[in-house]
Amino acid sequence: MKTSYMLLLLIILSWPLYFLYQHQLGAISFLILAVIFFMKAMSEMKKLKEEKKPSDNQRDSEKIK
């Protein structure tokens, strides 16, 4: 998810989350934010794993050595 989309999502969700906080349901808004950032972190981890994964050609050449 692009940073601009993430920022836009947080701006859109800010009023409902603040409404929940004002009605002493802050735990729900915290849970929603935690899920959003967890999903963001998992997508970043997936990108990092794909970057670090060696290609098939490199694996074959390493076995020959």
Image: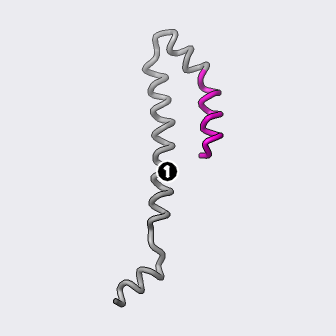
Q: Secondary structure at mark 1?
A: helix
Q: What is the x, y in percent for residue 17?
A: 55, 20
Residue 51 lies left or right of residue 10; in this view the side is left
Residue depicted at x 62% and y 45%: 2
Looking at the picture, does residue 23 appear above or below residue 8? above
Residue 38 sits in which quadrant? Answer: top left
Residue depicted at x 52% and y 10%: 22
Residue depicted at x 41% and y 86%: 61
Residue depicted at x 35% and y 86%: 63
Magenta residue check for 41: no
Q: Camera-side residue: 23 or 59? A: 59
The residue beneath circle 1 is 44
Looking at the picture, does residue 10 appear above or below residue 47? above
Q: Which residues are magenta?
A: 1-14
Looking at the picture, does residue 19 appear above or below residue 4? above
Residue 1 lies left or right of residue 34; in this view the side is right
- The local crowd at label 1, few if under 14, some if 14 to 19, many if 20 or more residues have their Cα within 10 Å, is few
Give the amino acid type for the residue marked by disc 1 in the picture: Glu
